Image (tube, grey):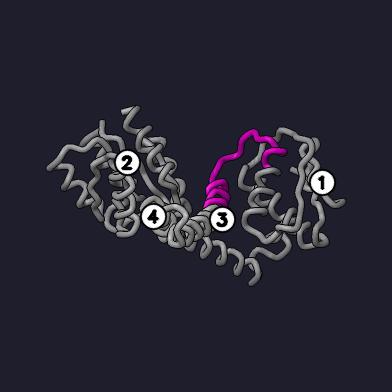
């Protein structure tokens, strides 16, 4: 059962999560323009400065840092866009791998290993599937010890991990 | 075109360094005026802009200059359905912000090649 389903739809927690979702959507849009300026200007400045100089090194650090932020923003934007896609045939193994990539990019899970085994083809909403897989992963991350490996097993339209299952 | 000066100026600079001769304008209205006066090979436009959106501009250019390719740039999380539909209805490409120099150059070259 997902985060939203655990509380009544009209409960304050559910409304707060919905508001947070709307704010996040707007914030991602607002962040994207300054990021274009930051990363793009750094990339131009890199080519304008002499490699090996302190200035070039500092610009390179700014560029790399900007790219890291940009990757987080792009991952979240892709997740939002997925919510609008209609139901279709999809690979559950690939969806699980995408969910792991999103969680690894966005959350501080550097000391957690993830793996996926098996695959299955299902007809489902890509956005809903991704959302439920992310919730499953987040719950597992919160329960896991530091340095743990979280293994997702996909079989017959069911994803299992840590004794729990997600049926699609 | 982009109403954000930083994005507009940077996009112009990247394309200039790649050998193109771009003109930056802040609104769709400015773009339509400029297109009345000069010949262009391609339009690169933000989606979310005041007065006239990039999607509305795409429709307007489809009426006025149907052969002129239009690339839309978007922050990706506003108006996703309309933006996707715009591509289905004839935008030459969709560029998600934040984009890299390589992504901008690639989509511009691709749109000009297929024109």
Q: Which residues are magenta?
A: A73-95
Point out the frontmost of discs 2 and 1.
2
Residue A86 covered by magenta stretch = yes
Q: Chain ID for label 3?
A: A
Q: Residue furthest left?
A: B37
Q: Comparing marks 3 and 1, which lies closer to the viewer?
A: 3
Count residues near mark 4 (Cα–Cα under 10 Å), then give few for <14, some for 14-19, many for 20+: some
Q: Which callout, 1 or 4, points at the residue further toward the start of the chain?
A: 4
Residue B86's x, y, as percent? 38, 40
Q: What residue sits 25% from the left and 44% below the top?
A: B22
Q: Earlier in the sequence, mark 3 or mark 4?
A: 4
| Position in image of residue B31 (x %, y %) | 22, 48
Residue at 33 percent across and 53 percent down: it is: B10
Question: Mark 3 packing: few (<14 Cα in 10 Å), some, or many (20+)?
Answer: some
Numbered badge on residue B1: none
CA distance separating discs 3 and 4: 28 Å
Nearer-the-camera pick, B26 or A92: B26
- Numbered disc in front, either 2 or 4: 4
Q: Main secondary structure of the magenta part?
A: helix
For label 2, the SS is loop
Q: Is any part of residue A115 visible from this angle?
A: yes
Q: Which residue is mark 3?
A: A72
Q: Which residue is mark 4?
A: A49
Residue B4 left/right relative to A120: left
């Amino acid at each position: 059962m997902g985060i939203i389903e655990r509380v009544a739809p009209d409960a304050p927690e559910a409304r707060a999560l919905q508001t947070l979702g709307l704010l996040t959507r707007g914030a991602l849009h607002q962040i994207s323009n300054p990021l274009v300026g930051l990363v793009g200007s750094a990339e131009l400045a890199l080519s304008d400065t002499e490699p090996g100089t302190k200035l070039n090194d500092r610009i390179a650090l700014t560029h790399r840092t900007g790219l890291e932020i940009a990757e987080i923003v792009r991952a979240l934007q892709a997740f939002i866009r997925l919510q609008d896609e209609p139901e279709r045939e999809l690979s559950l193994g690939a969806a699980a791998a995408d969910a792991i990539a999103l969680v690894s990019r966005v959350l501080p899970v550097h000391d957690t290993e993830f793996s996926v085994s098996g695959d299955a083809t299902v007809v489902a909403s890509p956005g809903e599937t991704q959302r439920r897989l992310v919730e499953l992963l987040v719950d597992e991350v919160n329960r896991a010890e530091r340095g743990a490996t979280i293994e997702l097993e996909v079989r017959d339209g069911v994803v299992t991990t840590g004794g729990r299952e997600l049926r699609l | 075109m982009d109403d954000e000066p930083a994005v507009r100026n940077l996009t112009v600079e990247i394309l200039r360094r790649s050998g193109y001769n771009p003109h930056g304008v802040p609104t769709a209205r400015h773009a339509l005026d400029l297109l009345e006066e000069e010949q262009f090979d391609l339009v690169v436009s933000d989606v979310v802009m005041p007065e006239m959106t990039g999607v509305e501009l795409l429709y307007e250019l489809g009426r006025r200059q149907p052969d002129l390719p239009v690339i839309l740039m978007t922050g990706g999380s506003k108006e996703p359905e309309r933006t996707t539909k715009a591509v289905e209805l004839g935008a030459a490409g969709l560029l998600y912000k934040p984009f890299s120099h390589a992504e901008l150059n690639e989509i511009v070259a691709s749109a000009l090649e297929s024109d």
